Image (cartoon, grey):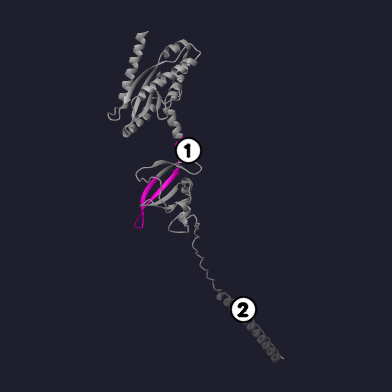
Amino acid sequence: MKGMTRVASKKKSAVKKKKSAKKAGAKKSAARSKSGAKSKKSPKSKKLPKSRNPPAKRTMKKSSPRDAGSENGSLMDVILDHSPDGIVAVDRKGIIRYVNAIAEDLLKDTAGNMVGQKFGLPVDTHRSQDVRISGEDHKETVAEIRARETKMGREKIFIVSLRDVTERASLEAQLRALSDVDPLTGLLNRRGFLEAAKRQLNLAQRQNWGMTLFFLDLDGLKWINDEFGHLEGDQALIETATILRKTVRGPDIIGRFAGDEFTVLAFEGTERSDSSIKIASRLRKNLEEHNARKRVDRKISFSIGVASFDPVKSPSLEILIDEADFKMYEEKRQKRCSR
């Protein structure tokens, strides 16, 4: 009996060992499969390089080439077209090689018409200058022009920049007019007359023209102010300016030189025989006609001194004024003596 029990016990023990071995084998197999799964890594996918396509070039119309050397635009064309200034490239012969869009607007023409043609504006690398440009619409634009010299390869090129300064020029002209014009009479003031007269005398000397300077003094302005008031005195000055405007011609220059003093620089041309006499005669005639129409007690009268400009001797403006001023006071003195 005991022997049978031992045999059965051995059989059970063998069965248990087999089951344990199977479980251990299953665990090892599972562990191997897991480690195999971990060791097998999926291959990394290589990233393809990004496409490096060159930027598209701005194509320019053949009918309006901005560059004589190329029909295709470039990044530089885009930059220059967005510049606040007009840009023109000119070669050493003065031929236009390039024009940007702003320059087309300022010069009132297309690049197609201008490229290959002579540049009509001054190119000065030492200083800037203002130029006036007018197109078919007769509208005038003032542009500030600057130029600098550079090289394109072995070729000398001038880069010309144009900037619209029309508003600035208009404001400067207004300020200049205010500083040169007498506000009461609308004539040139002393400063304005002197500047204009000097320019005219320089031109007269070069062209061999004769000129006559008239120096006038309104008689009795103090008496008019005292008797009728300063408003009436101002009116007498305005009337004197009107008479002078009626007397002189286009190229003649009139100014209110001082309180009651007026100056006229009259053009005589090359035939100077009796021009000053005719002007003085016309002046007195206009004065008489003006006084005949007046219905007030006071009349306009003035004393006159005359000096002639000889382009050969070429006296200065200051000498002419002194001479005419002296003769004017001589006439005024004679009037007082004759009363």
Residue 78 lies left or right of residue 198; in this view the side is right
Residue 193 lies left or right of residue 228; in this view the side is left
Q: Position of residue 126 (x, y in %)?
A: 34, 44
Q: Which residue is drawn at 37% across and 26% down?
A: 265
State the quadrant of the C terminus.
top left
Q: Position of residue 96 (x, y in %)?
A: 41, 52
Residue 4: image quadrant is bottom right
Nearer to me, 132 or 275 = 275
159 part of magenta stretch: yes
Q: Where is residue 216 in the image (x, y as percent from the top left)?
A: 38, 19
State the quadrant of the N terminus.
bottom right
For the residue marked with disc 2, what is the amino acid? Ala
Label the magenta part by its dominant secondary structure: strand
For the residue marked with disc 1, what is the amino acid? Glu
Q: How far apart are the two marked residues, 1 and 2, measured between alpha carbons? A: 92 Å
Nearer to me, 297 or 16 = 297
Residue 127 lies left or right of residue 242; in this view the side is left
Mark 2 — residue?
30
Mark 1 — residue?
167
Q: Which contiguous range is marked in magenta?
A: 146-170
On the question of residue 257 being in view, the answer is no
User: Nearer the viewer's eye, disc 1 or disc 2?
Assistant: 1
